[in-house]
Image (cartoon, rainbow, N blue to C red):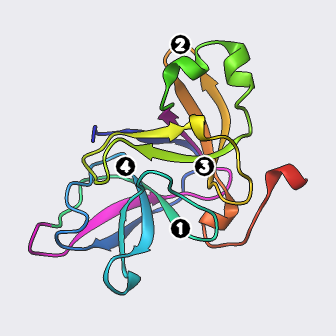
């Protein structure tokens, strides 16, 4: 995983320290998407993997500010900048050629999608999976806009990923 795969641009909240589990979440870096209620007893946080976050399934807490201190044999901690509905983050599109013109980007605006991770561990690169198509019932992040010059997408978390109720933006 590269450092700073995802960044909060505006609307982030306070920074909260969470526990990380030994030998489960090893390798978390600053700028990683963090979800909670994982591991033994659902008392830990870890990285968002491919297909995360899902509404009413995952609890998306935010973006890590530092590397996790866990090791293969000892639990650790990580500091996470919390997000809320309306927080704007940036993360690269999984396939940058899908957003390299205004017309292509326009076709994806307000789609509800998830993250893609190139490996099933913290070692994988995190991107926005704009390829999967919108699903307002399941997918936990919404594409707000993007930059066609470098494939960067601006996204916001959906309410039901934050543990505060289901929100279908297309039903408004």
Q: Which residues are magenta?
A: 71-92
Image quarter of residue 155: top right
Judge whether residue 146 is colored magenta: no
Residue where numbered disc 4 is placed: 32
Of badges 1 and 3, nearer the viewer stands: 1
Which is nearer the N-term, disc 1 or disc 3?
3
Element carrying mark 1:
loop
Q: Which is more toward the observer, 18 or 99?
A: 99
Q: Position of 137 compared to 73: left or right?
A: right
CB contact under 8 Å: marks 4 and 1 = no
Mark 3–mark 2 Cα distance, whole angstroms, equals: 24 Å
Residue bearing mark 3: 11
Camera-near label (3 vs 2) is: 2
Q: Position of residue 109 (x, y in %)?
A: 73, 32
Q: Secondary structure at mark 3?
A: loop
- Between discs 2 and 1, the one toward the N terminus: 1
Q: What is the distance, in whole Å, between disc 4 and disc 1 at their CAs?
A: 16 Å
Q: Is residue 103 left or right of residue 78?
A: right
Q: CA distance from mark 4 to mark 2?
A: 23 Å
Instruction: Point out residue 133 in the picture as x, y percentages from the top left corner.
Output: 66, 40
Query: Which callout, 4 or 2, points at the residue further toward the start of the chain?
Result: 4
The residue positioned 66% from the left and 59% from the top of the image is: 138
Mark before the other along the chain sequence, 3 or 2: 3
């Amino acid at each position: 995983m590269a450092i700073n795969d995802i960044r909060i641009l505006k609307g982030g909240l306070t920074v909260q320290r969470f526990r990380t589990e030994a030998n489960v979440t090893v390798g978390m870096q600053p700028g990683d998407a963090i979800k909670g209620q994982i591991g033994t007893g659902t008392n830990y946080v870890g990285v968002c993997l491919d297909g995360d976050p899902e509404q009413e399934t995952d609890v998306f807490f935010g973006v890590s500010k530092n590397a996790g201190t866990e090791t293969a044999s000892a639990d650790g901690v990580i500091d996470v900048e919390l997000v809320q509905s309306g927080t704007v983050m940036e993360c690269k599109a999984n396939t940058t050629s899908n957003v390299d013109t205004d017309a292509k980007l326009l076709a994806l605006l307000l789609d509800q999608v998830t993250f893609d991770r190139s490996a099933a561990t913290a070692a994988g690169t995190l991107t926005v999976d704009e390829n999967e198509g919108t699903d307002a019932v399941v997918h936990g992040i919404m594409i707000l806009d993007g930059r066609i010059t470098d494939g960067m997408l601006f996204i916001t978390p959906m309410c039901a990923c934050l543990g505060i109720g289901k929100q279908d933006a297309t039903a408004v």
